[in-house]
């Protein structure tokens, strides 16, 4: 079929109308999606830069979840330390009561209470876990990831080991003192504190057999009870000091993670805003463009109609 011949005026108006229609389609798409760059075809440079920013923001978002979990883990450990220090205060009160009591059987009864408090400290430590990790037992440690790349920016949170039980759980052949725990013979409930395999702090327990105490026990009913119990008070105070130090370390770690959490959230906001600046459309501007293009389209249709009437006038002359 032969091409239809159009007059110059009709063709000019047609091209203008087609251009306006294309711009209308683009503007409508931007208003519908809210984006001025929806694919690499629209603007490769802005599209891929925005993709990179969004990928980093997504990676950092996953780190926020890890930071939140570690904050809860440290909070659980700190809560355990606080309550354990409360038990230690009670233990010290029981020992002081025994020191002022001249009746050996009453002191032994207080010793039974003391051993029960040791077990409560152990159970409190065991119950201070979160997410399967307990920073108060087995020298557990965990690493917090801050950067989107693993291992690039981290914080190691080191726990300690607070345990109580028989000498087989503590070690053998020796004595418990304020400077170290090596266990002893027999069975008792000694309390030990071990910081990452370093110096061990021990608290001697009451000798439950009411006879000569083993290496990690104290005979609360014996004649030398005053010196022995005064030594136990010193051991408790040393353990309290160590727990206070660990609570301070936990608080520092918590502050670091909280600060990094806030920083990461800010970084995510910056990256997301940067990506949006490169790809999102200004809806106010696009709305104004739509009105202008609709007006231009209507005028183009009218202009095309006028150009067509000129050809119709030629037809009337021929007739």
Image: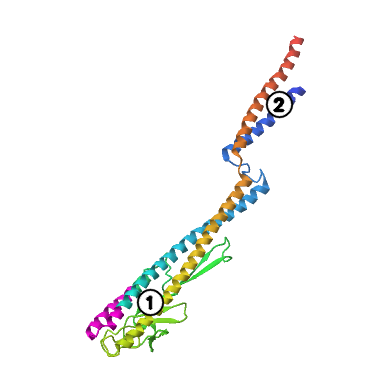
Write down the quadrant of residue 78 in the picture. bottom left
- At x 24%, y 81%, the residue is 109
* Foreground of the two, 126 or 74: 74
Work out which quarter of the rendered image holds the C terminus and state it: top right
In this view, the residue in front, 108 or 116, is: 108
Outermost top residue: 319
Q: In this view, does 208 lie above or below 159?
A: below
**99 in magenta:** yes
Q: Is residue 55 magenta?
A: no
Residue 26 locus on image (x, y percent): 63, 36
Which x, y percent locates residue 46?
A: 66, 48
Badge 1 is on which residue?
163
Residue at mark 2: 14
- Relative image position of residue 269 (x, y in whole percent): 56, 52
Q: Quadrant of residue 127?
A: bottom left
- For the residue pair 229 and 164, the one nearer the viewer reads as 229
Give percent across and percent down for residue 305.
Answer: 69, 20
Q: Give the range drawn in magenta.
A: 94-120
- Using the rendered view, name the quadrant where residue 184 is placed: bottom left
Work out whether 113 lies above or below 23: below
Q: Which of marks 2 and 1 is nearer the N terminus?
A: 2
Which residue: 57% across, 40% down?
33
Q: Mainly helix, strand or loop, the magenta region?
A: helix
Q: Going 52% across and 59% down the picture, which residue do you hit?
A: 261
Please say if 11 is above or below 181. Answer: above
Mark-to-mark CA distance, 2 and 1? 89 Å
Location of residue 130 with respect to 311 vertically, above or below: below
Q: Is mark 1 on a helix, strand or loop?
A: strand
Q: Give the secondary structure at mark 2.
A: helix
């Amino acid at each position: 079929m032969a091409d239809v011949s159009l007059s110059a005026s009709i063709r000019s108006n047609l091209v203008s109308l087609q251009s306006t229609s294309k711009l209308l389609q683009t503007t409508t798409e931007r208003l519908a999606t809210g984006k001025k760059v929806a694919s690499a075809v629209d603007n490769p440079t802005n599209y891929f830069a925005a993709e990179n920013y969004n990928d980093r923001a997504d990676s950092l978002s996953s780190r926020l979840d890890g930071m939140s979990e570690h904050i809860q883990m440290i909070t659980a450990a700190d809560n355990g330390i606080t309550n354990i220090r409360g038990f230690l205060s009670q233990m010290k009160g029981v020992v002081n009561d025994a020191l002022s009591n001249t009746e050996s059987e009453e002191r032994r009864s207080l010793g039974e209470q003391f051993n029960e408090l040791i077990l409560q400290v152990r159970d409190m430590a065991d119950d201070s876990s979160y997410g399967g990790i307990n920073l108060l037992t087995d020298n557990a440690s965990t690493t917090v990831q801050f950067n989107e790349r693993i291992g690039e920016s981290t914080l190691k949170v080191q726990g300690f080991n607070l345990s109580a039980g028989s000498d087989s759980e503590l070690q053998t052949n020796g004595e418990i003192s304020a400077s170290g725990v090596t266990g002893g013979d027999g069975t008792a409930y000694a309390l030990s504190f071990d910081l990452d395999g370093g110096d061990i702090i021990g608290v001697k327990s009451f000798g439950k057999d009411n006879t000569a105490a083993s290496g990690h026990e104290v005979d609360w009913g014996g004649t030398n009870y005053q010196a022995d119990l005064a030594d136990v008070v010193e051991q408790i105070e040393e353990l309290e000091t160590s727990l206070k130090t660990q609570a301070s370390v936990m608080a520092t770690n918590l502050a670091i993670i909280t600060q990094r959490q806030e920083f990461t959230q800010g970084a995510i906001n910056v990256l997301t805003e940067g990506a949006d600046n490169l790809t999102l459309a200004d809806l106010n501007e696009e709305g104004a463009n739509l009105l202008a293009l609709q007006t231009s389209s209507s005028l183009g249709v009218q202009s095309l109609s006028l150009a067509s009437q000129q050809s119709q006038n030629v037809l009337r002359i021929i007739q």
